[in-house]
Image (cartoon, rainbow, N blue to C red):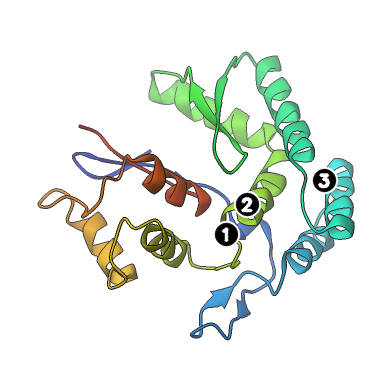
C-alpha cells in the first residue's frame, strides 16, 4: 500500500496491460495508444506467451467466442482461493461491477506477515493474474486504451463527475496536491470507484 498524501490511499495498481507482452497498438483516435486492435488480438497476444494449460483453454475459448466468460473468470479465481486457503489464508471477497472479485480481508497486521501474504498471493495467482487482467480490460475498457489515466478521465466525464476540460494533467495534479485541495469529485462514490477499478487502479480517500 502506498500513500501519496495523508488522506489518500492508493490500494494498488492491478495488472492490466502488463499481462500482454506485445507493444501497444497506435490508435487513430486522437493518437491514443491501445493495448491491441481488438479483444481477440489481445487474447491471441497473451496465448503466444502462455504455458499454463488452464489459461490456454480459457484463451482458446475466448478467441473463438470473442470474450472471456464470467464462469471462466470465476473458475480461475476459485483456483486462487483454494491455493490461498491451503496456505492458511481464509479470505472474503466482494464482487465488483466489472465482474471481478476484490479481497476484503482479513489481512495480516504486521509488515512481515503482510510480505509473506503478498508472496503467497503472487504464487497462487498463476492462472488468475492473466485472466483477471484480460477480463478487466474486456469489461471495463472497451476502447482498449493503453493509458489507465486516460481511461479514468474519460470514464469520469462520461459519468458526469467532471467537465470535459478535466484531463490527465488535472488528474495527476489532483493526486499530487490532495493534501492541499480535494478532488473536484467524490473519490469514494460508486461511480468514481467503478472508473478506478476498470482502469486497474485502487484509489480511496479516508474521511
Give the mark nearer the N terminus: 3 vs 1.
3
Find residue 49 and report its image quarter. Answer: bottom right
Could you say whether the residue bearing mark 3 is in a helix, strand or loop? helix
Residue 156 visible at all: yes
Q: Is residue 70 above or below residue 133?
A: above
Q: Residues within 10 Å of mark 1 (few under 14, many from 20)?
A: many
Quadrant for the N terminus, please: top left
- The image shows residue 144, relative to residue 174, as above or below, that is below
Task: Please state the horizontal and vertical placement of residue 59, each as a whole percent of the image.
Answer: 83, 52
Q: Please state, as top left, top right, bottom left or bottom right, where the C terminus lies in the image.
A: top left
Q: Which mark is residue 64?
A: none
Measured as percent of width and height from the top left, residue 170 is found at 25, 67
* Residue labelled with disc 2: 139
Label pair 3/2, CB-CB below 8 angstroms:
no
Whether label 3 touches label 1, CB < 8 Å? no
Residue at left offset 61%, top offset 28%:
120
Provide residue 9's location: percent of width, then percent of height. Answer: 31, 40
Q: What is the secondary structure assignment of the residue under circle 1?
A: loop
Amino acid at each position: 500500500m502506498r500513500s501519496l498524501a495523508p488522506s489518500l490511499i492508493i490500494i494498488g495498481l492491478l495488472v492490466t496491460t502488463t499481462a500482454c507482452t506485445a507493444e501497444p497498438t497506435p490508435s487513430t483516435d486522437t493518437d491514443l495508444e491501445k493495448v491491441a486492435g481488438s479483444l481477440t488480438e489481445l487474447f491471441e497476444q497473451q496465448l503466444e506467451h502462455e504455458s499454463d494449460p488452464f489459461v490456454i483453454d480459457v484463451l482458446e475459448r475466448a478467441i473463438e467466442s470473442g470474450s472471456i466468460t464470467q464462469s471462466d473468470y470465476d473458475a480461475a479465481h476459485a483456483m486462487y482461493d483454494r491455493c490461498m486457503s491451503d496456505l492458511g489464508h481464509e479470505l472474503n471477497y466482494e464482487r465488483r461491477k466489472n465482474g471481478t472479485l476484490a479481497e476484503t480481508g482479513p489481512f495480516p497486521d504486521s509488515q512481515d506477515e503482510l510480505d509473506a501474504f503478498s508472496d503467497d498471493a503472487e504464487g497462487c495467482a498463476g492462472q488468475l493474474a492473466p485472466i483477471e487482467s484480460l477480463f478487466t480490460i474486456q469489461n471495463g475498457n472497451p476502447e482498449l486504451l493503453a493509458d489507465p489515466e486516460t481511461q479514468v478521465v474519460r470514464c469520469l466525464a462520461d459519468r458526469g463527475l467532471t467537465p470535459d476540460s478535466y484531463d490527465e494533467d488535472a488528474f495527476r495534479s489532483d493526486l499530487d496536491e490532495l493534501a492541499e485541495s480535494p478532488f473536484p469529485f467524490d473519490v469514494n462514490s460508486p461511480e468514481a470507484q467503478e472508473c478506478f477499478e476498470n482502469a486497474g487502479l485502487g484509489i480511496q480517500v479516508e474521511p
